[in-house]
Image (cartoon, rainbow, N blue to C red):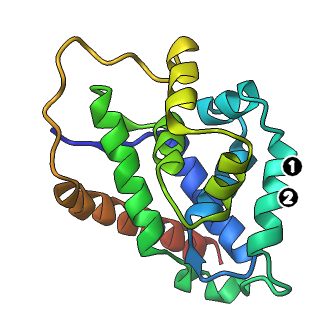
Amino acid sequence: MKIKFSQELLTILGYARDEAMRTGCYGIGADHIVLGLLRHRDNNACRALAACGVGLEDFKEAIDARVFSDQAVPWHDQALVRPTRAAAALLSASAYEALKHDQFEILSSHFLLALLRSENNAAVEYLHDKGLRYDAVYALMREHLFVLPRSGQEPVLPKIEDLLGPLGEQLTHLYGEARDKINYYS
């Protein structure tokens, strides 16, 4: 069994890197991934948030207010911008959400569900302040088929520690490819 990021989530992760640089951070955190998700917009996580009554522009502004610094990361330092351990753990939890739904591709909806179970980031604090909790959002996502219902059998899930290695390798590869493409054009 091999789990991978969907093309949608790979695009969002690329945007997250841009958002980290824009906000002046060398570490791509959970909030930067959410900013990337909001920038992408055409995904089930944004549709679920909108269906829950979250104003996407207000959400973006709230996160920006918490993570934005006066100086962006200089373009020549882009290779130094890397995911934080907290972001990697959140992506691993997203993989866990995908596997719980018998899927082997991590989607934006899986990321949102994992985010709602996380702590210590501006995005989840904002969502919790709006009254959004995992169970309610999960029910809405199932109703609108933003996540597929679980099959009758509970899948056998790998340990989260077993997921960290392959996902960490995918993240490293993803950002290495992005750096190589940028170096190719510069």
Quadrant of the rendering where the C terminus is positioned:
bottom right
Give the CA separation, mark 2 to mark 1.
Answer: 5 Å
At label 1, which amino acid type do we have? Asp
Q: Measured along the vertical axis of the image, is residue 22 above or below residue 129?
A: below
Q: Quadrant of the N terminus?
A: top left
Give the image location of residue 62, x and y in percent: 81, 59
Tell me residue 60's x, y (percent): 80, 54
Q: Are marks 2 and 1 in contact (CB under 8 Å)?
A: yes
Q: How many marks?
A: 2
Q: In the rendered image of this protein, does residue 133 appear above or below residue 170?
A: above
Q: Residues within 10 Å of mark 1 (few under 14, many from 20)?
A: few
Is residue 75 positioned above or below 153 on the image?
A: below
Seen at 56% across and 67% down, the residue is: 120
Secondary structure of the residue carrying tag 1 is helix
Q: Which residue is mark 2?
A: 61
Which residue is denoted by mark 1 in the rendering? 58
Residue 113 seen in the figure: yes
The residue depicted at 31 percent of the width and 58 percent of the height is: 167
Residue 104 seen in the current view: no
Looking at this view, is 73 or 112 the one in front? 112
- Name which quarter of the figure residue 96 lies in: top left
Residue beneath the point at 70% across and 66% down:
19
- SS class, disc 2: helix
Q: Residues within 10 Å of mark 2 (few under 14, many from 20)?
A: few
Height in image: 98 above or below 35?
above
Q: Amino acid at mark 2?
A: Glu
Q: In this image, 82 relative to 58: left or right?
A: left
Residue 3, percent from left and from top: 27, 42
Give how far across and how far down residue 23 sits, in percent. 76, 75
Q: Is residue 39 left or right of residue 175?
A: right
